[in-house]
Image (spheres, coloured by chain):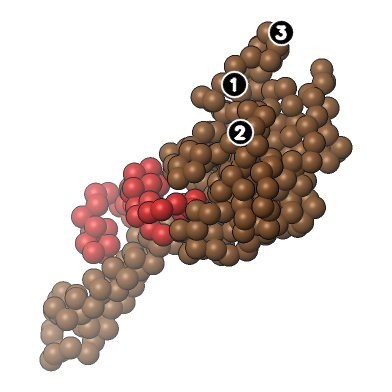
């Protein structure tokens, strides 16, 4: 999977490394900004109130 | 991340090439089994990294975001108080936040208190007073009742993280524009069901009190990093102190 991505990136090793880094940062950003905030309420870690539900 | 995973894939491919099938004269791709194994391995690594990132997000990043937001809202409240200073005691503004909670034992300075205990409120790094299932009685109303609050134990500001450090007799001070309400902790319930709404009663019988009074109740989840149970701390109003011109904190906070 990652090998496949690596082979399909353009440029020499340095350029590929740089693009990889940018991709990683983009993925982490997407996770922190959209995916985790969406997933968090679905997980039972952060309910602090007492209620009837 | 990509490079590590790539290295692993490379190795798996070489292993597959060395052991699988008759020797081939030319360099060839990995066999289907080796490919599948390498893909599976990469997926496992990815899952591990994802979970690790989620922990970082939950325990660190949400705090960063929440503290920033809470600070901004707190500044707004303070500014508003300063502006209304000349008008004298006016109507209570519940929109931006009604005051600040100071609990020395929590060791985190002041906590803004806002209306409601929904995640959209609490995730801003503030404490919320209950409107459901039982309505909190605000100390500013002067009526007898229970001032019930909730805040996060971990992440999103983790304002009640150190709730287990509170002992009987510790002060819990609520600051409004005009008054300091000094409460003293008198009962602690280290573990209760999340369905136990009785802890929010106007007269919290579980704390041992049977008569109406001015109570404060702090709730959060326990044990840390989970929300299987609820941790409850009760306090009773000790005295009310007028805010002076220099906003000198009561002696409990000095």
Q: Which mark is residue B92?
A: 1
| Residue drawn 32% across the image and 71% down it | B44
**Which one is earlier in the sequence, the residue at label 2 or at label 3?**
3
Question: Residue B86 appears in which quarter of the rendering?
Answer: top right
**Which one is earlier in the sequence, the residue at label 2 or at label 1?**
1
The answer to the question of whether label 2 and label 1 lie on touching residues, with beta carbons closer than 8 A, is yes
| Residue drawn 50% across the image and 53% down it | B197
Chain letter for the part of the structure drawn in brown: B
Pointer 3 chain: B
Rendered-image quadrant of the C terminus of chain B: top right
User: Is residue B150 at least partly visible in the picture?
Assistant: yes
Secondary element at tag 1: loop
Q: Is residue B77 above or below residue B161?
A: above
Chain letter for the part of the structure drawn in red: A
Q: Is residue B180 above or below residue B119?
A: above
Task: Sort mark 2 into few (<14), some (14-19) or many (20+) by Cα contacts within 10 Å.
Answer: some
Q: Measure the C-alpha gap from mark 2 to mark 3.
A: 23 Å
Residue that badge 2 annotates: B138
Residue that badge 3 annotates: B86
Residue B1, position as x, y percentages in the image: 39, 60
Residue B111, position as x, y percentages in the image: 64, 38
Q: Is residue B2 above or below residue B77?
A: below
């Amino acid at each position: 999977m990652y090998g496949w991505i690596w082979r399909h990136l353009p440029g020499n090793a340095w350029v590929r490394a740089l693009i990889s880094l940018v991709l990683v940062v983009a993925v982490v950003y997407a996770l922190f900004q959209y995916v985790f905030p969406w997933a968090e309420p679905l997980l039972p870690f952060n309910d602090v109130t007492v209620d009837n539900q | 991340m990509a490079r590590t995973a790539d290295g692993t894939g490379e190795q798996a491919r070489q292993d597959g090439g060395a052991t699988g099938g008759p020797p081939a004269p030319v360099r060839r791709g990995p066999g289907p089994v080796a490919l599948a194994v390498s893909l599976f391995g990469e997926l496992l690594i990815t899952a591990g990294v994802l979970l690790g990132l989620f922990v970082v997000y939950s325990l660190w990043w949400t705090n960063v975001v929440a503290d920033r937001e809470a600070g901004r809202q707190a500044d707004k409240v303070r500014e508003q108080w300063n502006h209304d200073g000349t008008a004298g005691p006016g109507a209570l503004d519940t929109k931006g936040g009604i005051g600040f909670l100071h609990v020395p034992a929590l060791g985190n300075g002041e906590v803004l208190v806002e209306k409601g205990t929904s995640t959209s409120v609490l995730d801003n790094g503030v404490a919320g007073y209950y409107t459901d299932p039982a309505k909190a009685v605000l100390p500013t109303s002067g009526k007898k009742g229970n001032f019930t609050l909730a805040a996060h134990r971990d992440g999103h500001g983790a304002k009640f993280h150190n709730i287990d450090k509170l002992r009987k007799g510790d002060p819990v001070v609520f600051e409004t524009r005009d008054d300091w309400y000094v409460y003293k902790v008198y009962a602690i319930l280290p573990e209760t069901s999340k369905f136990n709404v009785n802890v929010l009663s106007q007269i919290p019988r579980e704390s041992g009190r049977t008569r109406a009074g001015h109570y404060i109740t702090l709730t959060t989840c326990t044990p840390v990093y989970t929300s299987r149970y609820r941790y409850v701390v009760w306090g009773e109003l000790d005295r009310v102190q007028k805010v002076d011109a220099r906003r000198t904190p009561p002696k409990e906070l000095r």
